[in-house]
Amino acid sequence: HGTGHGIGAYMNVHEGPMGIGGGNVSGDMLRGNQNMINKYLEPFKEGMYVSDEPGFYNEGSWGIRIESDIISVAHTTKYEHGARPWLKFDYMTKVPFCPNLIDMSLLSPAEVELIDNYHADVRKSVTPLLTPAAVKWLVRETMPLAQRGN
């Protein structure tokens, strides 16, 4: 399974023209297949809607993926070079990661910060749409990881 795929017209969940990673497809196989070249080597453009599905598979046993929908948007960076545009991904799926499934000992400080920032964005974006009981749940599920003690 690849890391991500296009999502688009007519609710086609594996729509190109872009994708992220070829899953367990070798580079030789990818280079020898024009459809795969078109899908996995297509440059991203602003506004492309794609899934982000990092995961782990224990062969023959089980697997897990964290799946989010993201969109490519224009971005400015200190690494500007010529007229080449830069892009970043913004999350479209505003759902917290389950904190009880996060093992803090496996995360770098930058990864903890990324999750905490994502959770802060989820709180800010979703809170106005929720009932008081749902807000209470969301605040608990999106509190900074270090405050959880796990």
Image (spheres, grey):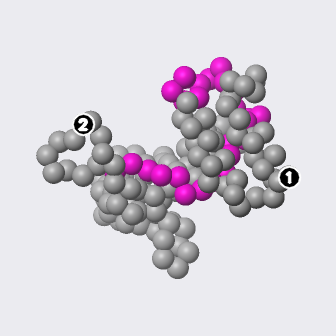
Q: Which of 148 and 25 is in front in this view?
A: 148
In the picture shown, does residue 90 fall above or below 15? above
Can you say whether 139 is above or below 111 in the image? below
Side of 79 relative to 68 (left or right): left
Task: Look at the picture and state if 18 lies above or below 8.
Answer: above
Horizontal relation, residue 125 to residue 82: left or right? right
Q: In the structure shown, which secondary structural element does the residue marked by tag 1 occupy? A: helix
Q: Position of residue 111 (x, y in %)?
A: 54, 30
79 falls in the magenta region: no
User: Is residue 114 or residue 76 the one in the foreground?
Assistant: 76
Tell me where the magenta segment starts and ends, as one range.
87-112
Return the x and y of residue 106 as percentages of the image width and height. 62, 23
**Residue wearing tag 1:** 133
Q: How crowded is mark 2: few (under 14 residues within 10 Å), some or many (20 or more)?
A: few
Q: Can residue 2 be seen in this view?
A: no
Decide if residue 99 is in sight here: yes
64 on left or right of 30: right
- Nearer to the camera, 84 or 132: 132
Look at 32% across and 60% down and name the residue there. 45
At horizontal 67% and vertical 51% (from top left) the residue drawn is 95
Which quadrant would residue 47 be assigned to in this image? bottom left
